[in-house]
Image (cartoon, coloured by chain):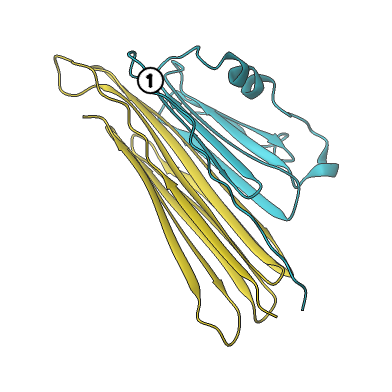
Chain colours: A yellow, B cyan
Amino acid sequence: MKYAIPFALAIVMSAPAFAADKGPVGNAAAGSGGAAAVNGQSATTLGAGAVSKTPDTSSKALAMGGSAAGDNVKTRSAVHGGNNLNGQAMAMAHNGGDMAKSHTVCHDRNDAVACRTKTMAHEPGSKPVKSTSEGSATIQ
Amino acid sequence: MTRFSTTAILLCLGASPALAQASIDVQAGNLRANAQAGTSDSHPERDKQIARGPRTDDTRNCEARGVSVQNGNSSASASVSTSPGGSSVVAGGGSPGSHAEFFGCNAPTDRSTR
């Protein structure tokens, strides 16, 4: 009995920058997420970040999350960095044969936010089903 | 072999009005994230939700958790929350001056300002 649903979508959103005397200023927000599931094992990760840039400063915020359900699960999420933020979230569930994984990485820079999510669902005897989704936004 | 299915929905709701604010909502499975850039009062209800949140020290429901990150001048914010089910984890961070606050079972220990 086979059943696998990997699923991922990307969201891209950028806000138009408004004129500034000192280079581009404005706001941007982006994120991505995805989920994979197979035979009782499921894994989901996502991330979203924002950057607001003025001539004097660049403010950023980044949030990541992961969730997994199944027989053996592992989740991990972290955000590192100071002026430039890097975040990742990983989630995996398996039962020794069937496995679902999801991994999201986000980068929050001075003038851009970019996130990418990769998912994979695999059951013995079948090819892994993979998908990738990306979301990015740049202050122009 | 147990059948299992998971649906994931991602939504993007946002607009870029004349003030050049940017926001994004992402939902996948039992996770939900939001990020906003630019000072905005266009989502007052959402701000209230972040501020009040399901903030609790009740660890009996440790599978539901979230994090909210707010920049010092409120020009950038991001949050992630999970609903109960399975094992979940969240993380958040911001540029210097930001404040990250966790709710759910991380709440008693994980609050930080940088």
Quadrant of the drawing holding the C terminus of chain A: top left
In front here: A118 or B69?
A: A118
Residue drawn at point x = 62 percent, y = 24 percent = B50
- In the image, residue A73 sits, relative to residue A117, either above or below, namely below
Residue drawn at point x = 24 percent, y = 21 percent = A25
Residue A97: image location, x then y, percent: 65, 81
Whether residue A109 appears in this view of the structure is: no
Residue drawn at point x = 63 percent, y = 50 percent = B29
Residue drawn at point x = 26 percent, y = 30 percent = A139
Residue A138: image location, x then y, percent: 27, 35
Considering every residue shown, the one lying at the far bottom of the view is A125
Side (left or right) of A29 relative to A4: left
Whether residue A92 appears in this view of the structure is: yes
Going by the numbered disc 1, the residue's amino acid type is: Gln
- In the image, residue B1 sits, relative to residue B14, either above or below, namely below
Chain of the residue where label 1 is placed in the rendered structure: B
- In the image, residue A31 sits, relative to residue A122, either above or below, namely above
Total numbered circles: 1
Locate residue A125: give its quadrant.
bottom right
Residue B78: image location, x then y, percent: 50, 31
Quadrant of the drawing holding the N terminus of chain A: bottom right
In front here: B1 or A90?
A: B1
Q: Secondary structure at mark 1?
A: loop
Label 1 crowding class (10 Å Cα cut-off): few <14, some 14-19, many 20+? Answer: many
Side (left or right) of B89 relative to A64: right
In front here: B74 or B8?
A: B8
Considering every residue shown, the one lying at the far right of the view is B60
Residue B90: image location, x then y, percent: 60, 44
Check disc 1 and report the residue beneath it: B21
